Image (tube, rainbow, N blue to C red):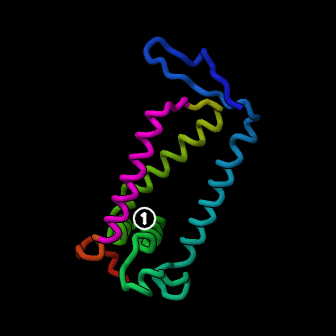
Amino acid sequence: MTAYDPRMETLDDQRRVAVDERPRRRRILPVFITGIAALAAGVYLRAVDPNVPGHYPGCPSQIFLGLDCPGCGGMRGTYDLLYGDLSGMADHNILLLIFWPVVIVAFAVWAYRSWTGRRPVVDIATQARRSRLMVWLLIGVLIFGVVRNFVPYLGSGVG
């Protein structure tokens, strides 16, 4: 259950805050499970090199179309990042320079809000803006996925 907490209002900004009344343990459990799964995926990726053929299933777009997809470049770039090779990461997928910091900040915000049980109430207009932003981001990533196969620097050099 969420409830409106008038104590969270200030005179400067009249933002409303929803309060999650579930026990903290129940609120933080999804964050904990997601964090453990991400850590396990990172450990596995660090241990098993995606640049060596046969360790991971073949990419359908590479097999059927002969095109590099951003997902494979993202996995190889994340592998390079786990070893501290930022130039290798950027070579495999330049979008990772933006993606991973955004993911880390979003996870931290989710963890904080789950821990405190407070989150801002989102009105319809804000939700509509967020939905449009997500659609445009998805379109941008899809365009990048196509363009990276035609601009030499953006390709992963794999294949």
Q: Position of residue 22 (x, y in %)?
A: 74, 34
Which image quadrant for residue 24?
A: top right
Identify the amino acid type marked 1: Gly
Q: What residue sits 65% from the left and 27% below the top?
A: 19
* Horizontal side, residue 20 vs residue 47: left or right: right
Q: Is residue 139 magenta?
A: yes
Q: Quadrant of the C terminus?
A: bottom left
* Horizontal side, residue 135 vs residue 19: left or right: left
Q: Position of residue 54 (x, y in %)?
A: 54, 88
* Residue underneath mark 1: 84
* Secondary element at image label 1: loop
Q: What residue sits 70% from the left and 40% below the top?
A: 27
* Horizontal side, residue 5 vs residue 69: left or right: right
Q: Quadrant of the N terminus?
A: top right
Q: What residue sits 44% from the left and 33% below the top?
A: 125
Q: Nearer the viewer, residue 49 or 16?
A: 16
Residue interval drawn in magenta: 120-146
Q: Is residue 40 magenta?
A: no
Q: What residue sits 64% from the left and 60% below the top?
A: 37
